[in-house]
Image: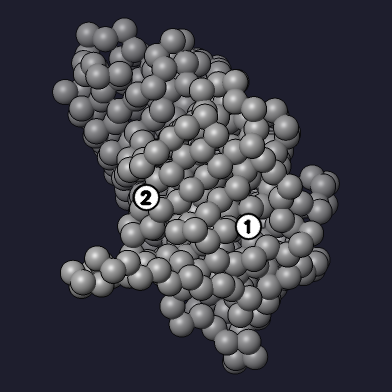
């Protein structure tokens, strides 16, 4: 395996019986290593950096790196770029920063993490992924193992069938039109990268497409530079998605995670940046519902669309039983559209259509960093839509709870509407409960101008 291991024994840690730190790095292929002004080291061990594409912003790119570790580590990020904006900062704000200067920052960690190092907001940042130590990885040549070792691999589509494992070794970069998986007991895992950078929109497939999968596991891999939807669960039942990283924002329509007609889904410890929607839940074809979905402990970043866009495509039996908790939103869309707009944008957008019921959702512990620009926090609006040239009526929305949502950062032009509007008496937004909604240290209540309850909306409460 192409990796380097650095084990650091501290005499005091050994004396007191504390766990020694272990750091595993994965050298990048020579053609993939980014030529950048950043450098990263972990406990003195150098970490290679990759590039992702973001043409909307200065430089047209941003950077990421990864390593595995256990114990407590120090991460040192340095920059040789001339500083005009006050030096490097780190997001989310929960890290212990040991030192910071105009040209560098050192922070510590003792558990897996994703950290965003910024200088000028979203222009050319660095994302650092600290993974848990990989345990019992599949062996090359093992039964039913599709093994990609360190280095660059180019493939058209990669098909994965029942009982197969696709393993991407750390340092592997698979450039492809997409993974196409269908069947039972499929695993996709490792520390490698699946890249859509060679695909143009006209030819680009969905970068990770999982159709009709049962008992699916996806862990540890990085998806980058998609030309279409990035990670898609379509008619799946039983899927665990953990420690996956999505480094996109190359073009619009690159939704980070699309959950379509799927149930019993767990998405945990995921970092996702995209130009388009981050989590889109859809019932697109057939009557299968979207239900029993849990999304937790994630960092979600959109450049042009919504963090959660749930609905619009509503051709299934129902959407129900969706639980979301512990979400950090460091950046939201730069192109604000108010909730009255047909394509109104927000942090959470709930939009049932086509007489489909949407109910039994909860959102808890959502942290939104305001960047001074306007943003709508919640749009709860059953509405009629035009889908591929055909008109569809509204659905119904009920039994939604949103608890412990906070907004912090720059309040300059932040709007923060909580917007509720039904379509007609038969297609209401009703029984929606909000608790502890806090903007810049001030609790929002029913008297706030941002709390807007319009026609055909009932049982809307905030405390």
Locate residue 45, reporting x and y percent.
Answer: 52, 61
Return the disc, 2 or 1, that comes first in the chain's sequence: 1
* Residue plotted at (63% across, 76% down): 2
CA distance for labels 2 and 1? 19 Å
Q: Secondary structure at mark 2?
A: strand
- Res. 378 image quadrant: top left
Locate residue 166, reporting x and y percent.
Answer: 61, 75
Count the marks.
2
How packed mark 2 is, by other alpha carbons closer than 10 Å (few <14, some 14-19, many 20 or more), is: some
* Residue plotted at (47% across, 32% down): 101
Does residue 250 lie above or below 221 as drawn?
above
Does residue 277 lie above or below 425 as drawn?
below
Which residue has dot 1 on it?
48
Q: Is residue 448 left or right of residue 386?
A: left
Locate residue 336, reporting x and y percent.
Answer: 55, 18
Locate residue 14, reporting x and y percent.
Answer: 25, 72
Does residue 54 lie above or below 196 as drawn?
above
Is residue 275 in view?
no
- Image mark for residue 108: 2
State which quarter of the image contains the N terminus.
bottom right
State which quarter of the image contains the C terminus.
top left
Q: Say which of 160 and 353 sits in front.
A: 160
Q: Is residue 391 left or right of residue 228?
A: left
Q: As drawn, which residue projects farthest toward the front?
A: 11
How packed mark 1 is, by other alpha carbons closer than 10 Å (few <14, some 14-19, many 20 or more), is: many
Q: Is residue 384 left or right of residue 147?
A: left
* Residue plotted at (72% across, 32% down): 59
Is residue 150 in view?
yes
Q: Secondary structure at mark 1?
A: loop
Q: Say which of 13 and 362 sits in front.
A: 13
* Residue plotted at (51% across, 38% down): 104
């Amino acid at each position: 395996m192409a990796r380097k291991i650095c084990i650091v024994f501290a005499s005091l840690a050994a004396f007191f019986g504390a766990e020694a730190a272990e750091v595993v790095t994965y050298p990048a292929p020579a053609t993939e290593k980014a030529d950048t002004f950043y450098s990263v080291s972990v406990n003195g061990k150098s970490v290679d950096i990759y590039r992702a594409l973001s043409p909307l912003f200065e430089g047209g790119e941003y950077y990421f790196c990864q390593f595995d570790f256990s114990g407590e580590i120090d991460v040192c990020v340095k920059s040789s770029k001339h500083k005009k904006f006050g030096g490097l900062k780190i997001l989310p704000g929960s890290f212990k920063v040991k030192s910071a200067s105009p040209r560098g920052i050192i922070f510590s960690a003792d558990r897996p993490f994703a950290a965003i190092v910024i200088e000028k907001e979203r222009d050319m940042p660095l994302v650092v992924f600290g993974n848990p130590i990989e345990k019992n990885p599949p062996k090359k040549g093992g039964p039913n193992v599709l093994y990609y070792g360190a280095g660059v691999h180019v493939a058209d589509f990669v098909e994965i069938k029942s009982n197969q494992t696709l393993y991407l070794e750390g340092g592997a970069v698979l450039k492809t039109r997409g993974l196409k998986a269908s069947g039972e007991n499929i695993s996709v895992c490792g520390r490698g990268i699946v890249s859509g950078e060679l695909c143009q929109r006209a030819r680009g497939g969905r970068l990770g497409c999982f159709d009709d999968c049962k008992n699916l596991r996806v862990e540890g891999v990085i998806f980058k530079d998609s030309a279409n939807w990035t990670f898609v669960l379509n008619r799946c039942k039983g899927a665990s998605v953990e420690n996956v990283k999505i480094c996109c924002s190359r073009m619009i329509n690159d939704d980070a995670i699309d959950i379509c007609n799927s149930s019993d889904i767990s998405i945990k410890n995921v970092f996702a940046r995209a130009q388009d929607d981050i989590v889109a839940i859809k019932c697109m074809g057939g009557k299968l519902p979207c239900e029993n979905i849990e999304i937790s402990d994630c960092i979600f970043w959109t450049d042009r669309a919504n963090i959660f866009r749930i609905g619009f495509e509503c051709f299934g039996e129902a959407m129900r039983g969706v639980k979301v908790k512990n979400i950090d939103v460091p950046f939201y869309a730069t192109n604000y559209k108010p909730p009255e707009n047909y394509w109104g944008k927000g942090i959470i957008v709930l939009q049932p259509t086509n007489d489909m019921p949407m109910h039994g959702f909860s959102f808890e512990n959502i942290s939104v960093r305001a960047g001074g620009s306007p943003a709508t926090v919640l749009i709860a609006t059953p509405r009629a839509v035009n889908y591929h040239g055909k008109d569809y009526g509204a659905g119904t929305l009920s039994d939604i709870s949103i608890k412990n949502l906070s907004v912090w950062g720059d309040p300059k032009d932040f709007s923060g509407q909580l917007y509720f509007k039904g379509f007609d008496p038969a297609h209401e937004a009703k029984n929606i409960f909000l608790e502890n909604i806090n903007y810049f240290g001030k609790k929002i209540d029913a008297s706030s101008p941002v709390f807007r309850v319009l026609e055909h909306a009932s049982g809307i409460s905030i405390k």
